[in-house]
Amino acid sequence: MIRNYLKIAWRNLWNSKYYTAMGILGLATGLSTGIFILLWVQSELRYNAFDQSAGQIYHVGSDMSSGDDYTVWSTTPGPVAFHATKDVPGIVHAVRVRTNWNYSVYSFDNNHFEKETAAYTDPDFFALFQTRFLHGNPEQPFKGNKSVVITKSAATRFFGSQNPIGKMITGDYKDTYTVTGVIEDLPTDSSLDYHIFFPVSLMDQFYVNSTYWNSKDSDWGNFNYETYLQLAPGISPATIESKLTDIQQKNDPNATPLFSGKAYHLQPVSEMNLYDANGAPSGIQTVRIFIVALFLILLIASINYINISTARAMKRAKEVSIRKIIGAGKKQLFFQFITESVLFFGLSGLLALGCILLLRPYFDEISGKELQISLFNKELWKVLFYTFAATLLVSSIYPALFLTSFRPLQAIKGKILPGARTTSFRKVLVTVQFVFSIILISGTLIIGKQLKYMKSKDPGYNRSQILTFYLQGEMSRHSAAIKNQVENMPGVKGVSFSSNYILNNGNTTGDTDWDGKKPQSDFIVNPFGMDANFIPLMQMELVAGQNFTGTPSDSTHYILNETAVKLAGIKDPVGKRFSLWETEGIIIGVIKDFNYTSMKHKIGPSVIYYAPDASRIYIKINGREAKDAIAGLQKIWNNYNSGFSFNYSFLDDAFDKMYRSEIRTAKIFNIFSVIAIFVSCLGLFALTTYTTQMKRGEIGVRKVLGASVFQITRYLTTGFLKLVVLSGIIAIPLAWYLMQWWLQSFAYKAAIGWYLYAMAIILVILVAAITMSFQTVKAAMENPTKSLREQG
């Protein structure tokens, strides 16, 4: 029986090649797109999925008062992990992680490697994340401060097939470390994508001459570490937060009553890419929008299949009726059409799978991810099965019921008059399909608008034609001489030094004090060192006071940004006492707020201090002479650092890269919108075909009575275009709600005008009109004698 069903199903599909090809194309497009989205969402939700114990691993953020509110920073002071291990029951492991920026080049023999990611960490790091040791002793990963643990891929790059244990790695041609362990690579989709690990005890060297903090284990003032905790089963994160807060209040000599009631916030590591440290949604908004897009596209594909199936039904009405007359039961016919749907979906699924395997490299490039697609991957087949089964279930029931509902005698005579309920249902399907399409197109336009807004919004400085790089090796000891050389180069308009990268200043501290400081008014600031040329070079605006003068007295002068002044509650700040890192001084100016991170985040408080010998150089270049200027800088670089590659960047380019994730989201959504319109129009084309078949006799009568081709075309398309307009009216509030939801993760939002939604509707109307015109014009131009003879 099944075999017979399959034979008949194949014959029917083959005999309707046109409809079959159109249906398979639409369904395969929807299925492959849906599976790509599912795989992308799956990779996002598996971020930091180290092992089964990941559910008990938490990242610690610092809750800090900021005037009338508080914010949560992703970093903590060093003593948090130290006391968590020693003094808090219920914590299995506590480790600190800090990126090691000290070295640009690592060497072994005559082989040199750049862009290796490295970090300082505690020995318990490897136990907490259950990394597998290939070489070395997991119980004692480090053997003194001059040892390192490296990953398998780093070992292969450095040593090839040699045993790495005992081999020596040199950082920046000066500091040598012994390899004491080799571990499996950590997941690339994690917050810990490092390849070289240094013992965190090395950080104690920075406290040797400190007059205030004795070591990293007692330094409560500097928030330098990412801290991770593994809790014992059954231990509540809230309990740990409370105990860590008590420890901070007891041990921090500068502790003040907490505005928020707690000093630290625990966040599951699996949520770090989905939510900000304070729990506010960030990446999860994009994931949710993509899930919505997934369902919209699959439903559009399903509706498209239903519309094509009902259009095909008109040509199969006589076949179904004859089979009914010769004894076929409704149940048999129903299962026959279900078998056709399964075969149809099977062919579509195979084509979709082929598209996935073929197009994966392009999707990886657009999304910035390496999706794991293997025919032996159980997870892939699970995704395929659920997507296939759900879409099949939704799409096949109605066409099967519709095809078995014809009245035999009327169908044989060609007089099929579907009821009002059937016609209304198809109109609902078309409306829903275009509602989804308009939502996706609106989303594309709004995402593009937000991206353009972030890239064009004034960041508080002029980044045009600014070249920057970090002074490495010998250059850091000759900054004054280098400045003189660079200033005298042709094509150079100005030179300045800063301690930080203006696009990503991650330095934080709570070591601040000022006159009139009130309890509960502590907040974390971003310290920013610069020389006297930086503010004019970057065309930053002073709203009060003055800039540094470039004299030694500037060592006790500070410039605060507007946010810092507001949070500190300092009235008339110029001339007031201010202290940073226990260095007393006065405020000499207030600078207009400027962005030093992505515009997804609010501008935080910043304190600018004088640092004429800072290690990052900023150079303003004449655009027409940029090539010569870069060549001259290369020569200067080679004179000091022949062993280092000259790595520079323009702030404009780096600024664009900062929004890489948003750019990728916009590109993917553009593709979704094109696919949605394409599949919707396939269904609309099929439904137009169905309508013209139903009205061939009426069209013939109208032509005989003198109707023009234009009048008939307008008559056939007006009803559908009204449905598209109705779709727009329904889609606008839904699209507005969804995009406002997505925009919540941005601190600065573009003004979204009604015209964007109108553009989406107009675009869909134009595409729909063009799609329908192919079939309606053809029907309007048909010889009326032929259609009337067939209808008669």
Image (cartoon, grey):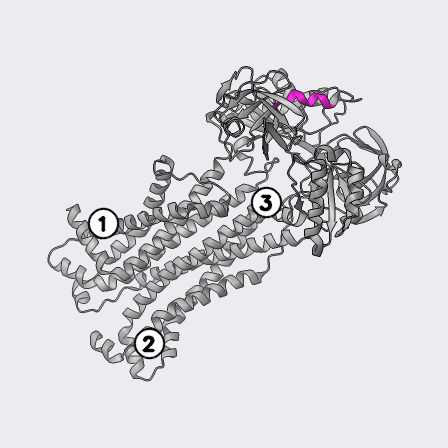
Q: Position of residue 516 (x, y in %)?
A: 84, 34
> Amino acid under label 3?
Ser
Q: Position of residue 251 (x, y in %)?
A: 72, 20
Q: Secondary structure at mark 2?
A: helix
> Amino acid under label 1?
Thr
Q: Residues within 10 Å of mark 3 (few under 14, many from 20)?
A: many
Query: Which secondary structure dominates the residues rendered in magenta?
Result: helix
- Residue 619 shown in magenta: no
* Residue that carries the numbered disc 2 in the rendered image: 780
Which circle's residue, 1 or 3, is located before the other in the chain? Answer: 1
Q: Which residues are magenta?
A: 198-206
* Residue that carries the numbered disc 3 in the rendered image: 745
Q: Residue at x 81, y 48 (%)?
A: 542
Apparent side of residue 597 relative to residue 701 in the rendered image (left or right): right
Apparent side of residue 741 relative to residue 527 in the rendered image (left or right): left
| Nearest the eye: 376 or 324 | 376
User: Could you tell me if the residues under marks 2 and 1 are in contact, i.e. CB atoms within 8 Å?
Assistant: no
Q: Residues within 10 Å of mark 1 (few under 14, many from 20)?
A: many
